[in-house]
Image: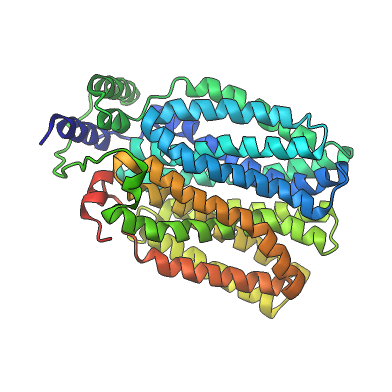
Amino acid sequence: MSEKEEILQEIIARIERLPITRYIWATFLIAAFGYFFDFFEVSMMGAVAPAAAKTFRVSTAEGALLITITLLGMLVGAAIGGYLADKYGRKRMFMITLIGWGSLSLITAASPNYVIMFILRFLTGLFLGIEIPTLDSYLNEILPSKMRGKYFQVVFAIFEWYVPVIFALGLIIIPLSPEAWRYMFIIGGITAIPLWLARTILPESPRWLAVKGKTEDAKRVMNNIEKHVEANIGKKLSPPPTVTVKPYISRSNVSEVFKGRNGRLTAFWLPIYFLSFFGWYFFITALPSILVARGFTIIHSLYFGLASGIGAAALALPPVFTIDTKIGRRGTMIYSIIIMIVSAAAYILFPTNFVLIIAGAIISGMVTIWADVVHQWGPETYNNEIRATATGINYAAARAGAALAPYIGVVIAYNYGLTGVYITGIAVALITLALSFAVPETRHRILEEIYAKRAV
């Protein structure tokens, strides 16, 4: 075994013995707050786009383009951001992206016309696109395997509540004046400032440092983490467990994502990401615009978004109790898709406004669970050297699906009604479910073990 492999094995063992203490939980939450900005963008643009379209006197379709160009920026950012995170480090990249996102959000609030806002939305999406695959990789790397799934989903269960909060803000702020939507961007930009300051205390991923041959840095970071943990528990940590898995060491370049076992895995993850986030954005972002196009007022569409957001947040809790049990990642995805299909069928059979609101709330919750599981599951299956690169490429596919969702949704709703929308959603869910059986279950498994023993 090489020196790099020995050091990485030592780091793995030391991470595996960590209990979840105040320090670990605070580190995890501060980093994971980046997901807030993803949820903020998804929810806010669904509410802001129709109002901004009226301000700039453009059509509803052109307003929807503001959503699409943001997602296109996220696509480009994800495609390059994962590679940058593998090359330059997780912490460095998510510090840079937060500065970019926050600054551009504040500048967007002052957009003088549609064209400027269009450009700023692309650039904002670019920085946010880099943030998410970096976070997915970082958070998976710093937690022990026995708790990785549960605490990942706890974070999502917390941050899902920002979706209805943002829609509620939209209901309060947007009706104040024709240009009150600008305050939504100011809120987002200001929020980035305290988070950037809090992130300065976060450690770099010790796994990434070890893989890059930064042996002393990796040991120093682990020593510091363990010092804080021991201060929290009031005693010395127990000896590290014996880790028998031999870490896989590969080159850190994009081509590795498409070679051998990685290539076969990517062939399944690309459509899973595409379809999962198509479904998520389809319901969370597209439906407000669809409802406006069908004659509902912007305020009514915001009420629908609020109901859907509450449903998503309330129903995001079950994965906390299932994802690290025998149900696992795949089982959690399966039950979310089954409940989604039943809810869609209920609206198809009983197409009333009341059923629409209830079914929409439940479906939003289930689609969110489905996407949240993919957030965690995908990065777990790749080796350390290319984890962020692969996640970024898969996330680019996710953003492509998200960018297409509003347009396909409007076309389907216009020609086939919301029944057609739900039938499309069922088909997308079933295809994703079938594809998920081709990727390995990762519950309670060390990241390096998942790669070494996977069947794909």
**Res. 21 visible in picture:** no
Q: Is residue 307 above or below residue 249?
A: below
Q: How many labels does the image show?
A: 0
Q: Position of residue 315 (x, y in %)?
A: 56, 56
Q: In this view, does 385 lie to the left or right of 171?
A: left
Q: In this view, does 185 lie above or below 320?
A: above
| Residue pictured at 89% horizontal, 38% vertical | 177
The colour scheme used to paint the residues is rainbow
Residue 210: x, y in percent? 25, 29
| Residue depicted at x 54% and y 30% | 97
In this rendering, is residue 332 above or below 135? below
Q: Quadrant location of residue 195?
A: top right
Picture quadrant of residue 427: bottom right
Identify the image quadrant of the N terminus: top left
Horizontally, is 5 left or right of 50 in the view? left
Q: Is residue 205 above or below residue 61?
A: above
- Please tell me which residue is depicted at 14% across the width and 39% down the height of the picture: 242
Near-viewer residue (267 or 426): 267
Q: Residue furthest front?
A: 255
Q: Which percent across, then down, holds residue 268?
A: 39, 61
Which residue sits at x=34%, y=46%?
A: 255
Residue 410 picture location, percent across and down: 73, 63
The one nearer the camera, 324 or 40, is 40
Tell me the quadrant of the picture where the C terminus can be found: bottom left
